[in-house]
Amino acid sequence: MSKTDSSLFLHFLGNGAAFNPAFGNTSAYIQDEKRLFLLDCGETVFSRLTDQHILNSSQDIYAAVSHLHCDHAGSLGSLILYCYYGLHSPMTLVIPDNCDQYVKQIMSLLRFMGVSDDKYHLLSAEQLNFFKPFTSFSYIPTRHDPSMFCFSFTFDTPAGGVFYSADTSETDQLDSFLKAHPDPEALYMEATDEDYPGNIHLYLDKLTGFLDPSLRTRTYLMHFNRPSCAEKGRAAGFRIAIPDLVRC
Ligand SMILES: [Zn+2]
Ligand SMILES: [Zn+2]
């Protein structure tokens, strides 16, 4: 790992794509004293949280879910039930402000997993303003899998703002973010080195062409389909979102 790949704003649990479980599902978190805010909760996330003893050092756990593909929501039910029964502190699901349909889908999915509505709290994203590292958090609709709701995330921060693409196939939302945040603190972008018609992921060369070299040095690539994608990204001047080492 290159020292310059260290990410200050987010800690990563994994940086892999859906069919690259060896890298762990792409997911990140912010810790603010005893509060934890998790971005996405795919199939490998709950085990990584427990392996690294992250949950037991947190009192209040919040989670936002970018979309319902298994590599982003696959262990959400286990996390919620563990918070309820194991930690005796129900988790808070942070939801978009203007997409009731998506919230209904998450709640329905959880019910099918045996997670009833009383096992967790809901909190609108605009109300998540009490974490010290950021002043506001938002869900931004994006284009990924056209059959489902998909979102990127943005943070307003004292150092210029943070963009987290989650899964996307386009740079439009990043473009809008950069117009409002021309000197961002950090950008976290998914990238794939596979290019084919109908690609639902963001082709690395497309991102490279969009971002000036000065912005690539504060852009952390994630959601790798294979190791060669990270190598190509680093060669193009990007940083890599590296998961933290296991904490024992
Ligand atoms: Zn994914
Ligand atoms: Zn996806």
Image (cartoon, rainbow, N blue to C red):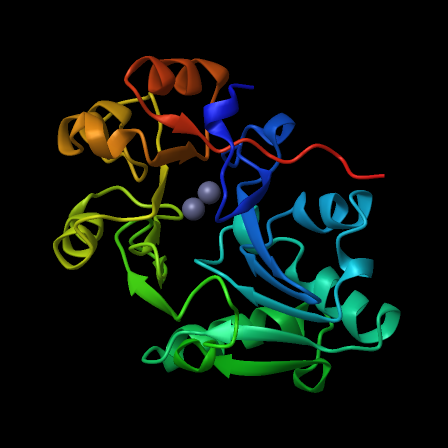
Task: Name the spot of residue 149 as percent of width and height, x first.
Answer: 35, 63
* Residue 45 horizontal side relative to residue 233, left or right: right
Apparent side of residue 239 relative to residue 241 in the rendered image (left or right): left
User: What quarter of the picture does the C terminus occupy?
Assistant: top right
What residue lies at 28% left-to-right and 35% top-to-bottom?
Answer: 202
Q: Position of residue 61 (x, y in %)?
A: 67, 68
Picture residue at 18% right of the left edge, 51% below the top: 178
Counting from the top left corner in percent of width and height, residue 113 is at 69, 67
Residue under the point 74% across and 61% down: 78
Q: Is residue 9 above or below residue 155?
A: above
Quadrant placement of the N terminus: top right
Q: Is residue 247 visible?
A: yes
Farthest residue in the front direction?
A: 158
Q: Which one is nearer the viewer's eye here, 82 or 103?
A: 82
Residue 31 place in picture, x, y as percent: 62, 58
Q: Is residue 150 above or below residue 8?
A: below
**Residue 225 visible from this viewpoint:** no
Viewer-proximal residue among 158 and 137 = 158
Apparent side of residue 219 relative to residue 120 in the rendered image (left or right) = left
Image quarter of residue 129: bottom left
Q: Which quarter of the figure has residue 189? A: top left
Along the line of sight, the residue nearer the viewer: 68 or 38: 38
